Image (tube, rainbow, N blue to C red):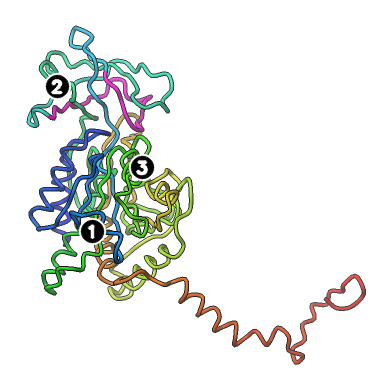
Amino acid sequence: MATQTRDLLEKILKSPTAPFREDRVRAAIESELDAHGIPYVRDAGGNLIAGTNRPESLSKGFHIALLAHMDHPGFHLGEPLGRGLWRCYWYGGAPFEAMKGARVRLHDPAQPQKTAIGTIRKMEYVDEMEEGLPFIVDFGTKADGFSRESFGAFDLVPFRLKGDRVTSKAADDLVGCVIALGALIDQEKQMKKSRNRGARRLIGVFTRAEEVGFIGCLDLMRRGDLPRNVWCISLEASRALPEAEFGKGPVLRIGDKTCLFDAEFSAVLWNIAKDLQLESKGAFRFQRRILSGGTCEATPLTLFGHKVTAIAVPLLNYHNFGKTKPNAEAVSHSDVDQARRLCAELGRRIEKAPVWTEAKKRELMSDFKRLQPMLTSTKIRIDSGLKSTNGAPR
């Protein structure tokens, strides 16, 4: 599994992307789905739903959707200003104050092999919370002939694996796409091994334009292409924090900056993670906490009525923030591989909607029935030595 995870990381992370310009990442994912015979469909907004070619069929039976977004902060090519200068427009978060002088790489969807490198000369934005922030790039003559659909991002390493450290221009959230894709491949192999062709409980949902406000995810729900009976796991590469440390396993994310996630689904995921840890004699590692550094797709899914939890891989240099200049992001290969395994095991071990709430209630009530008589027993004296206002012990 680890070797295949490495291969998927290289293929997906090397694909350039930006909000509303996810075509190359989507094509790379579709290529892997085709290679493994996994059905898929694009919805009207360009999101990719894998594991079925009939989304309406998901309203029957029990399914778990693994969600990851295909974009990363980047820019769109704008207007030529003369003398090799272009006005471009940035979408998503970035280290804006450190961007002047940084190199960027331009890609043309109409000419996939064609790229151009430029240098940021001036930031023109007023409010960095706006989307489509203007800035000036010097491309010289290298951007001549590029289509108006061209896009780009910082000119950083596409993919490098050294030891356990994966470095990339855009780990967020292309590693989430790798986790979901890998789990779907694992499910398909298991189905072929057991000759069971009708048990795709895991589906993959690869969304667009998350970095600018969950636009693809919201469009998916607005159109009703993801039935509300589908349980959802948001997969992210999220800023490393205390108790969410690089290389110490994927994080069971029970909440983000905006809201807490579903208690039942979070507990079910936690129990499976604990079982894997026990069965592997500690080789499987995981962490568990609220990651309050940002808001993920689990929040809009929660707001629209889905049962949701999340898994995150701790991320270094979030949104390309380096110490003094834009830098590549980094994740742990083992964190990614174990997150993939956890998702695959979730699909394998849960055949129908869990009833953790009822099981936990029965457990609590068993203790209650055994111990409740002690509340009124006359054989037990509780005297703290304190006196009530009327002089009687209390």
Mark 1 burial class by Cα count in 10 Å: few <14, some 14-19, many 20+: many
Magenta residues (range): 88-109
Q: Position of residue 30 (x, y in %)?
A: 13, 48
Q: Quadrant of the N terminus?
A: bottom left
Identity, as a three-letter code, of the amino acid under mark 2 = Ser
Foreground disc of the pair 3, 2: 3
Marks 1 and 3 close (CB-CB < 8 Å): no
Report, in whole angstroms, how far the alpha carbon at label 1 lies from the one at label 2: 38 Å
- Which residue is the site of mark 2? 147
Q: Position of residue 258 (x, y in %)?
A: 48, 46
Is 78 contained in the magenta span?
A: no
- Which residue is the site of mark 1? 337
The kind of secondary structure element at disc 2 is loop
* Above/below status of 167 relative to 281: above
Residue occupying image coordinates x 21% and y 64%:
200
- Which residue is the site of mark 3? 218
